[in-house]
Amino acid sequence: MVRFRGLHIVAGIVAMGVAAALGMVMGLNNTAVFTSSCVVFVAVSLWVQSRVAKFRTPLQGLPQHLPDGAALERPADLPSEQLPGGEGTAA
């Protein structure tokens, strides 16, 4: 299994540097260079993250979807004392 931890951050930082250099060459002021670099960082890091997510394998041993007929809500006949995590009605 290939690990891609932080690759999207590194790609975003590299793209941010390239955008800053291009902005300075074009003669943009510092605010415009910084703003455009931040926009490029977010765009590239999100794009790379979406591409890397395609290569990740799902966690082993966990169901990938609910089986047919599985309930998403708790049964109505379950008393609030038996709810996990102390959920229930406040008295």
Image (cartoon, helix red, strand yellow):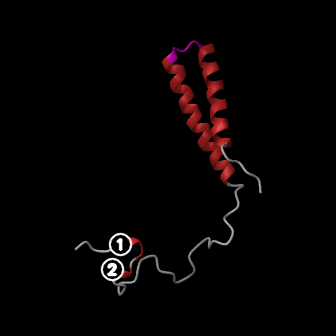
Q: Give the secondary structure at mark 1.
A: loop
Decide if residue 35 is on the left or right side of residue 83.
Answer: right
Q: What residue do we see at 63% from left, 14% from top?
A: 25
The spot of residue 20 in percent (x, y) is 60, 22
The spot of residue 53 in percent (x, y) is 66, 53
What residue is pinned by disc 2?
80
Q: How many marks?
A: 2
User: In the figure, 31 relative to 65: above or below?
Assistant: above
> Disc 2 residue type?
Ser
Q: Quadrant of the N terminus?
A: bottom right
**Is residue 27 covered in magenta?**
yes
Instruction: Classify residue 62 by image quadrant.
Output: bottom right
What residue is pinned by disc 1?
87
Do labels 1 and 2 touch, CB within 8 Å? yes
> Disc 1 residue type?
Glu
The spot of residue 72 in percent (x, y) is 46, 76
The Cα atoms of the two marked residues, 1 and 2, are separated by: 7 Å
Q: What residue do we see at 60% from left, 15% from top?
A: 24
Q: Quadrant of the C terminus?
A: bottom left
The spot of residue 79 in percent (x, y) is 34, 84
Q: What residue do we see at 69% from left, 68% from top?
A: 60
Q: Nearer the viewer, residue 24 or 10?
A: 10
Q: Give the secondary structure at mark 2.
A: helix
Main SS category, magenta section: loop
Q: What residue do we see at 63% from left, 39% from top?
A: 9
Q: For mark 2, does the 10 Å Cα neighbourhood hold few (<14), some (14 to 19), or many (20 or more) residues? A: few
Range of the magenta residues? 26-30
User: In the figure, 21 relative to 15: above or below?
Assistant: above
Q: Earlier in the sequence, mark 1 or mark 2?
A: 2
